[in-house]
Image: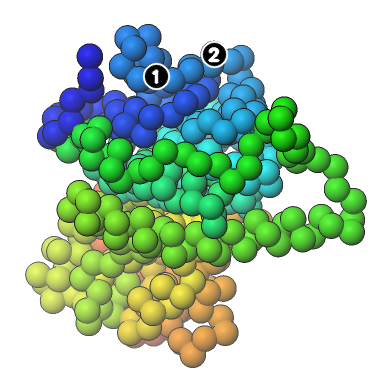
Amino acid sequence: MELEGGIRVVEGSYAVAHAVAMCRPDVISAYPITPQTHIVEDLSQFVADGVIDSKYINVESEFSALSALVGSSAAGARTYSATTSQGLELMHEVLFNAAGMRLPIVMTIVNRSVSAPINIWNDHQDSIAQRDTGWIQLYVEDAQELVDTMVQAYLIAEDPLVSLPVMVCMDGFILSHVFEPVNLLDQKAVDSFLPPFKPVAVLDPDDPKSFGMFVNPDYYTEFRYLVEEAIERSRIKIRDAAHRFESAFGRYYGDLIDTYQTDGAEILLVAMGSLIGTLRDVVDDLRSKGVPVGLLKIRSFRPFPAEEIAKAVAGAKVIAVLEKDISLGTGEGALVTEIKAALYNRDIRVPVLGFVIGLGGRDIPVGTIQRIVDKAEDVIKHGITVENEFVDLKREILNG
C-alpha cells in the first residue's frame, strides 16, 4: 500500500501527515492536543498500516514527545512532531535543548491561543512566545503552502551549514480542519528533492561524543553565538529551498517574505498566516476602487527578514501591521516591534501602525480590515495619533 499523490480534496491535517510521510521520518513522537491531534492520528495510522517505515513513540506529555526526538535526532534519525498552544509551552525547556544541540527536528505548530482563560481557537501567541528558543519559524497561508513547506523545512533544517530545528506554523482549525483541494506530493518526486538525512554528528558508542554537556561561563557565550550564526546562514537556505522547490514542483511562495500588489502602494498591510488570503481579497477590491494599497506577507519570522522588509516598504507612506499576538507590557504585537527595529537605523521614514487582531479566534471580517485601511489613510493626511491598538474591543465587557 502506498500513499497517493495528486490533487485531492483532503483535510488540512491529513495534507500535513501525507507531506511528512513523503519525507520518510525515522521517528515520530507526539502527544494529542486540539487542534493538532488529527495530524498524528493520521501518521500513527500510516505506521500501523505499514505505509511508512517509522517508529511511532507514544508518550505521556509534549515535554516527553520532544525529549524523545532530541535523543532520536542525536542518534541520527530524521524526526517529526506536532503540537499546539499549551503543549508547545510545555516543551519550552526542550526547545532550547534541541536548538542548542543543533538537532534538525521538524515540527508542525497548529497555532492556537494560550490559556488562561481556556480557548481552543486560533491566534499566534503560542509560537510567538517561543521566538527566542533558536528554532527557525515559518508561517504558511494555506494547505498547499503547508504541504510544500514541510518538505522544504527538512531540506533547510538538515543542511550542514544550518543544522537547526524548524517550526512550520499553521493556523488552527482555519487550516488544520478545512477540506480543500491540495496537490499532494509524489514519493519519487520528494525522494529526488530531499536527500537522505546525513547528520553532522551522531551519538555512537564506537565514537563517543557528548551532546548538550555542562559548559562554564568561559564558553557559554560562544555556543549562543554559534546558534545565532546558524540562523543567519539559514536565510540563504530558506531562499534556496523555495527556488529549488519551484524548479522541482512548479510552485513558489516567496522565501522569507512575499509581496502582493505593492507597486505604487502607499498603504502597506503586513501579516502572517491564513489572514493573508482575506487580505489579498481586500487589496484586490480596494485597488479596483483606486485605493493604493498593497500586501506584505511575512513567511519567516525566525530568521527575521529585516533587509527584505526594509526594501519592500521603502516606497510606502504608511505601514499597517495586523497580527494575532500581543507582547504584554509593550502594548503591541511582536511583529510590529521587530518591523520598527528593522527600520530604525535606515533612511526610511514611514509611519508604522500596529493592530492586535483576531485573538482567541475572533473573526476578522472585511469591514474591520477596511476600517484599518481608513485609519492608515488618515495617518497619511494628518499623522499618527494612535500608534497601536486592540481591534474591535467590546467596551461593554471592559466597562461591565
Which residue bears the numbered disc 1?
53
Residue 152 against residue 22 in the figure, above or below: below
Q: Position of residue 222 (x, y in %)?
A: 77, 61
Q: Earlier in the sequence, mark 2 or mark 1?
A: 1
Quadrant of residue 165 in the image? top right
> Dot 2: what SS?
strand
Q: Position of residue 355 (x, y in %)?
A: 44, 60
Q: Tell me the distance, in whole angstroms, between the alpha carbons under discs 2 and 1.
A: 16 Å
Determine the residue positioned at 37% across, 61% down.
240
Please state which of residues 240 and 273 is positioned toward the viewer in this rendering.
Answer: 240
> Dot 1: what SS?
loop
- Given the current orientation, which residue lies at the most extreme bottom position? 347
Image side of residue 205 versus residue 167, left or right: right
Query: Tag 1: residue type?
Result: Asp
Q: Quadrant of the N terminus?
A: top left
**Residue 399 visible in image:** no
**Residue 316 visible in image:** yes
Q: Estimate how packed mark 1 is, as few (under 14), some (14 to 19) or many (20 or more) residues with alpha carbons within 10 Å.
A: some
Which residue bears the numbered disc 2?
58
Residue 83, numbered circle:
none
Determine the residue positioned at 59% across, 59% down.
230
Q: Estimate how packed mark 2 is, as few (under 14), some (14 to 19) or many (20 or more) residues with alpha carbons within 10 Å.
A: some
Q: Position of residue 389 (x, y in %)?
A: 48, 61
Q: Position of residue 184 (x, y in %)?
A: 21, 34
Query: Tag 2: residue type?
Result: Asn
Q: Please say if the residues under marks 2 and 1 sit with CB atoms less than 8 Å apart.
A: no
- Given the current orientation, which residue lies at the most extreme top position? 48
Determine the residue positioned at 28% across, 39% down.
190
